[in-house]
Amino acid sequence: MKLLKTGIIIVLGFVITSCGGSSPSSQTLNFAEDNGGITLPDNFKAVVVADSIGQARHITAAENGDLYVALSEKKNGGGIAALRDEDGDGKADQVEYFGPHTGTGIQLYNGYLYSSSDTSIVRFQMTDNQLAPQGEPEMVVEGFPNQSSHAAKSFTFDQSGNLYVNIGGPSNACQEEPRTPGSPGQDPCPQLENHGGIWQFAADEAGQTFQEDGQRYATGIRNSVALDWNNNADQLYVVQHGRDQLNTLWPDYFNVEQNAELPAEEMFAVNEGDNFGWPYVYYDWQKEQKMIAPEYGGDGKTPAEEDNYENPIIAFPGHWGPNDLLFYNGSQFPQEYINGAFIAFHGSWNRAPEPQAGYNVVFVPFEGENVSGDYEVFADGFKGQETLTSPGDAEARPTGLAIGPSGSLYVADSQNGKIWRIVYSGGENSQQ
């Protein structure tokens, strides 16, 4: 990247300017003065790709820069939005809607666009130069449990032809009477048979069913909407939504401040056969240990037996709502970001009377397969106000992440469907 005296920045073959202009052979990005309402580290800028495409979930980018966004509610008859920037200013000039279902997971893989509903995963054959795929989708996996909570079937692919699918636990803590004060947990928890973990399927095989073809890869994970295969480490990683309502369900053991901060949102390195302990335990990030859940005899003070369950590799404050995980394999950002992890935190609902928290994108540095330092908030300001008491009042809630072909980072919002493209604009990489 080279900084020119004209104030235009060339980034991996693109021309970027905040004051307009054009180039016949390069892309010209025009940035908003306030980065579209968010705050970023020094030398990073953002352009708003779109501001109202619908209630976005996950997002993926094609090699030509086209974007595909899963929606939680249909818009213009479709559950997926396809976006194309035709004039190179970074903003979507063409938007098309397609697809018969809504959902969360979406990813391009081996010439197909894969997307998930709450009960299935389908794929669309992609065609060169066409923005929206033509034809009906092909069923990849069907028959996932139909559940009223934690139903999102987010997914990712490894480098060996496998598909990994999150199947969240259909409850808060597997109580005999769901979300009822003092109700004990079911022991053993029958929900773990078909929920609360990661299932593995063949990535390229159509016509699979959950019951006949799914292999349970790991268990004891309450809900991991955020998951990604780290190609650099050749390993699966997920970020779990921690359980809710410690104080409202167990007021003898937890006060309102503990209810707001606990338990942690945990990031796991996942190997086949791992058990992370839900619903029997939770992780207290302040004590830095697994604790016995109150539904199973815990009192907020009693740690779980060591070595029974896998520990997190890093932990975050309670109820931030991790909704996407992305390992940065681009080359545009500075070296310290390469192979590290970005996490989109959708924001909390269950911290009252304390202010809501999350609503940001954080970065976790990695060295090989291991976390190599503390996390830092990379992008903030999404909620649009200093103090937020209700998640519905947030201006934006980050929920999807993608890397574009130039190395830009895309962030999607679930409130109205705003999408940011974040670009590095100077510093150590200025000679790339």
Image (cartoon, helix red, strand yellow):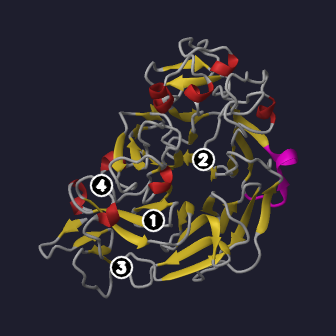
Q: Residue at the location (27% across, 52% down)?
A: 41
Mark 3–mark 1 distance (CA, rounded to whole Å)? 14 Å
Mark 2–mark 4 distance (CA, rounded to whole Å)? 24 Å
Q: Judge from the rendering whether residue 117 lies leftward or rightward of residue 248; answer left or right.
A: right
First in sequence, mark 2 or 4: give its number.
4
First in sequence, mark 3 or 1: give its number.
3
- x and y percentages locating residue 252 in the rendered image: 57, 17
User: For numbered disc 1, what is the local secondary structure?
Assistant: loop
Asked if labels 2 and 3 touch by Cβ distance under 8 angstroms, the answer is no
Say which quarter of the image contains residue 240.
top right
Q: Residue furthest right?
A: 212
Circle 2 sits on which residue? 225
Circle 3 sits on which residue? 89
Circle 1 sits on which residue? 404
User: For numbered disc 2, what is the local secondary structure?
Assistant: loop
- x and y percentages locating residue 141 in the rendered image: 79, 56
